[in-house]
Structures are given as C-alpha cells and as structure tokens.
Amino acid sequence: MILKSQVEWALHCCAILSGLPEGRYLSTKALAELHGLPKEYLSKALQSLSQAGLVHTTLGPSGGYRLAKAPNELTFLDVVEAVEGGGRTFVCQNIRANNPCRPKGFCESGPCAVARVMWEADEAWRSALRKVTFADLVQTLEAEVDPTIWSGTFEWVLKRAG
Amino acid sequence: MILKSQVEWALHCCAILSGLPEGRYLSTKALAELHGLPKEYLSKALQSLSQAGLVHTTLGPSGGYRLAKAPNELTFLDVVEAVEGGGRTFVCQNIRANNPCRPKGFCESGPCAVARVMWEADEAWRSALRKVTFADLVQTLEAEVDPTIWSGTFEWVLKRAG
DNA sequence: CTAATTACGGATACATGATATCCCTATTTG
DNA sequence: CAAATAGGGATATCATGTATCCGTAATTAG
Ligand code: SF4
Ligand code: SF4
C-alpha cells in the first residue's frame, strides 16, 4: 500500500507555487525541469490539482499554474486527495455475509466493528494531513533549506514565471 | 492506495481465533469455509500471520491455528502490518536533489519537511490501529451481532476445532 | 504402522492499476 | 499569424495484487 509518486510531485509543486508572487503563473515545463520529472506525466498530476479546484490555470505563452487559495488555506490533505483520490484504504467486501450459520436473506445493520476500526484509522491519517497547511510548510522550509539554494531557486523560478 | 483484501481476511480470522478456547486449533479449511474464501489463497494470509509470530500452528489432522498471544495483547496494527508490511505509505524519491540550482554534490541533511509531514500522518494511522486490541473487538461484536448467529457460529467453529 | 490431514513454500497464470509517452485540440500571448 | 500553453485521449509498459496448483514434511487418527 504505497502512495503514487504523483503525490510527492504534487506536494513539491504546490510548495513552489506557494512561494510565487500574486498574479504570476508557472508552467508545467518549468516545474518539471526544476524537479527533474517527465513533463508529460507531471502534467497529469497538475491536471488533477486543477480538476480539484486547488490551482488556477492560464493558457498561452507565460501561462501555467498558480494556487487558487492562499497557502494558509491549502492543506496537505487537499493535495493528497486530489491526486490519490478520497477513497478509504480499507474496502469492506462484506465477507461476513458468507457465514454458513447465518439465516438466508439476513440483512445486516450497517458496517461491522472491524470496518469501523479501520475507517477510524483512515480518519486519523486524514486528520493529521488536514492540520498542516502550505503556509506551515513554507515556513519550515525557509528555516531549514540552505539560504543559497533557497534564494537561488526562488530567482530561477521568477525568471520563468509568466 | 487500497489495502489488500488479505487484510480484511486476516482480521476476521483473528477475530474468530480470539473466541477459540485455550489449546484448540482451527484449520485453514474451516476458516475459508466460514468466510466463503478461496482456501489456498487465504492460506497465504495465515502464513503471513505465522511468520510474524502472531499465531501458533500445528500439523496433521486436528491441526491448524491459534493465537500466539492473549486477545488483549494482539492489536489491529499487528495483524495489518503482518499481511500488508510495515513500510510507509509515502516513499521519498528525493526529487529535490534534481534541483538545477543546487551546487553539484551537495549533500542533504536528512528528510525534508514534506516527507516528515507525510510520515507523521502514517504514524497517526498506525497509532489508531495500535490502540484497538482483539479483546476490544470481541467485546464490541458480542454486543452487536445477532445472538442467534453469534452462538451458532461459535458452535459451528467448535465442531471443527481440533 | 498406515493413511489421512495439515501447514508451508515454490511456481505459475491472470487482472488491475501505476508509470510513462505520444499526439491532437483549443486557447492565449506576443 | 506564430509560438507556447493546458487539457485530454490513446497506448504501451511494468509492478503488484489476486488466485490456483502442486510437492514436501510433519502430525494425528485409526
Ligand atoms: S469488515 Fe465487517 S462489514 Fe466489512 S466485510 Fe468484514 S465483516 Fe463485513
Ligand atoms: S519529500 Fe522531501 S526528501 Fe523526499 S524527495 Fe521530496 S523533497 Fe526530497
């Protein structure tokens, strides 16, 4: 059970977009180059973000992506669910219905205790991701990343932002 | 990102084994019949539990499985990790190393903030599963499951337990 | 002792989903 | 008008989950 690599890509792209000045856009090409990723495939991840309404897009030269909300309104969970989907990790196949002791046609009253425990764990996972915004992330990165690389990257990005 | 169906199977089997009297064993065949599952494939899940040391096995007729610990010492997390593996859901591919602005040969100081947030969410998930034991589960089931089915299943199992 | 039953592991086939690339279209900018 | 862009469909490839089959060693029932 492993998240798609698209998740990591999307998170990093949103981190970059969070540092972009108001009104500027960054293209798939630039984001792919910056992270060393296949442009066409990264495009699929960015399209997921667009379909989820997390980013805003513009066409043409100098077009690309920018965040649709402020960084402090965008959570990790938003991004993860946009590319990975919002489904549960535990899918109930109702195998208890196969119990030979059970009267035929017996109707169950909702999900059993097993499923509920698993779904609560899923919710704990989601809850942890919902607590962290991209404003938090940028703040942490700014404190941790080597200042030369940080400002160098920033400059590199602005040179390509439309 | 969906858990294998083996996880559900293993959880249900452990629930049954939790209700088994001390010293009795239940075979793969009986567990497969009870849940309506392919015997050979379910066997793989049970082998995972065995390799993880969660269950004890005996060969020969009247052989099968029993829990290796008391139900109040066996957690959901034990079972889930036994069949799903203990790895993280977020695997870091270190794409930040591809940043063209970064000095060549620059060495990173540990995992970045993105990975840490994802891993904390994983830990929240594990923590939720670690909190629930099979003693808890049996207690809930006993209160919720139709009494006729509950005792009927119990009788059915004991008839086949070696 | 003998025959039946069981867990276990290896080999194999199949289905599904993730990864990756290619190409066409509509739109916007310069 | 020409170049650059997001978007989406088609397709190929690969990894993983699902499922079955069979042989082996150990153990028990009769
Ligand atoms: S988890 Fe519960 S509800 Fe889901 S299949 Fe198993 S018994 Fe049925
Ligand atoms: S999550 Fe952080 S450490 Fe992992 S690849 Fe992305 S940038 Fe690197």
Image (cartoon, coloured by chain):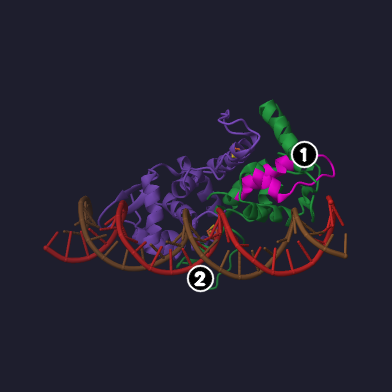
Chain colours: A purple, B green, C brown, D red
Query: Hey, what amino acid is under mark 2?
Result: Pro
Q: Amino acid at mark 1?
A: Leu
Q: Of D13 and B129, which appears nearest the observer?
A: D13
Q: Is residue B131 left or right of residue A1?
A: right
Query: Where is residue A44 shown, x and y percent of the image?
Result: 38, 55
Q: What's the magenta region?
A: B6-33
Percent across and percent down for residue B13 are 69, 44
| Residue A83 can be seen, yes or no | yes
Residue B8 is covered by the magenta coloring: yes
At horizontal 79% and vertical 43% (from top left) the residue drawn is B73
The picture places residue A29, in percent across and down from the top left corner, at: 35, 62
What residue sits 58% from the left and 28% below the top? A109
Residue ID at (69%, 45%): B31
Determine whether A86 is above or below D20 in the image. above
Residue at the disc numbered 2: B103
Residues B1 and A140: in front is B1
**Disc 1 packing (10 Å; few <14; some 14–19; many ≥20):** some
Residue A68 location, quadrant: top left
Left or right, A63 with respect to B149, comes to left
Between B122 and D5, the one lying in front of the other is B122
Chain for disc number 1? B
Ligand 2 image position (quadrant) = bottom right
Q: How many marks?
A: 2
Q: Main secondary structure of the magenta part?
A: helix
Q: Is residue A153 left or right of residue B92?
A: left
Could you say which disc has been placed on residue B158 in the image?
A: 1
Disc 1 element: helix
Q: Please tell me which of labels 1 and 2 falls first in the chain.
A: 2
Pointer 2 indicates a residue of which chain?
Answer: B
**Magenta highlight on residue B20:** yes
